[in-house]
Image (spheres, helix red, strand yellow):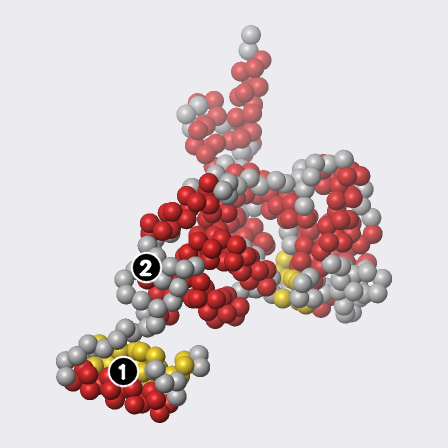
Amino acid sequence: MAIRKIRNSWWVDFRAEHTRHRLRSPENSKAGAEAYEAVLRQKLARGEQIGPMQPTYTFAEFAEKWFEGYVLPNNKHQEQRMKRYILNASLVPFFGKIPLEKITTHHVEQYKAYILRQGVNPKTVNNRLAVFGKCIRTAYEWLELKGMPPRTTRLKCPPSTTTFLSPDECSLLLSKAEGVVRDMILVALHTGMRQGELRGLQWSSIQWENQTLTVRHSLNDRLKKLESPKSNRERHIPMGIEVYTLLFNRKKDTGYVFSDAKGSPFDSQYVIRRLEEIRAKAELRKFTWHTLRHTFASQLAMKGAPLHAVQALLGHSSISTTMRYAHVAPSALRTVINMLSPKTAMHTAFGQQVGNAWGEAIEQEIEKP
């Protein structure tokens, strides 16, 4: 098609001598675009050069189009807010007036140095670079800009630490909790569900026959509605005897599983405040609802659960996210190291694991005079 309308603008789009020509019509109408096409073809027939394929945008101009045309349709509300903040507070003030095709890798490095001098930590820098990189790559794709987008080399960051509760801390926490919030804490510790998923859990998502609950929704406070979970996919979690018994004793036909006296779901600030009160009563270190999710995954890993199974239960889209729990899992490296020791390498009595043999060998060494 030689004439087309794109985002309320008429464009000329045709090929001549194996070259694609795509230009915005100076007169924004179908008839004007057809006349403009005829003029362009005449120029090409005479061997003349025709104008640029796309109008020039500054980063600020395109960033707004990208937000409306890509971020709003494809991202959830929380991510939209995050990207809007990064654009307005950091990226547009630095890159805003520069034409897109003029932005170079040197500009990106200058930006990194500038925000690092402001005291921004490397992880936050990388988050901002991720938004910039996606925006600029989209610009080159949508506008068919010549060349390659500037490189966005991310900073090296120390590995993030994962905090979780011990079994004793979990027991103490539950002993100080009561009512529906205690039920939410127990379910979080035994299923790894996120806070929003717990608040959005409905009785229709529980299958009593096969003792499974399905995570279909997360409750969004700002929009006051249910949305899909973070991974945009539902997941099925088998219920242990504690969770099954707890929920079966509160069983209803419809509505939210965890709700107030009127049947309405709790808002996030209420459950955050209640957890903090219970934590303080138990005199435990500070932690959040998400720590209960980390606790679920860490305790599974420590007991030898395969990480791909932990990934499925948590709903991680990538195994790399689940690998944060690998350091607490029983290590196969211990078996390899024990091969060097004749005291443990050949220990097979009663089918005990090498780890037991290692402990016995250590005790024998300690008992030696």
Say whether disc 2 or disc 1 marks the residue closer to the N-terminus. Answer: 1
- Percent coordinates x, y for residue 164 in the rendering: 63, 41
Q: Which mark, by number, is residue 171?
A: none
- The mark total stands at 2
- Which residue does the image show at 80% across and 39% down from the upper left? 281
Please give left or right for residue 324 compared with residue 176 in the image: left
Residue that sits furthest to the bottom in the current view: 31
Report the residue marked by disc 1.
Answer: 14
The foreground one among 216 and 277 is: 277
Examine the rendered structure and indicate whether residue 21 appears above or below residue 125: below
- Split into 4 quadrants, where in the image is the C terminus? top right
Q: Separation of disc 2 and disc 1 at Cα? A: 27 Å
Work out whether residue 326 can be spotted.
no
- Split into 4 quadrants, where in the image is the N terminus? bottom left
**Judging from the image, what secondary structure is the residue with disc 2 in?**
helix
User: Looking at numbered disc 1 in the image, what kind of residue is underneath it?
Assistant: Phe
- Percent coordinates x, y for residue 109 in the rendering: 37, 47
Residue that sits furthest to the right in the current view: 261
Examine the rendered structure and indicate whether residue 228 appears above or below residue 170: below
The foreground one among 17 and 284 is: 17
- Which residue does the image show at 32% across and 59% down from the upper left? 102
Work out whether residue 118 can be spotted.
yes
Report the residue marked by disc 2.
Answer: 102
The part of the image, by quadrant, that contains residue 216 is bottom right
- Percent coordinates x, y for residue 326 in the rendering: 51, 42
The foreground one among 182 and 235 is: 182
The part of the image, by quadrant, that contains residue 25 is bottom left
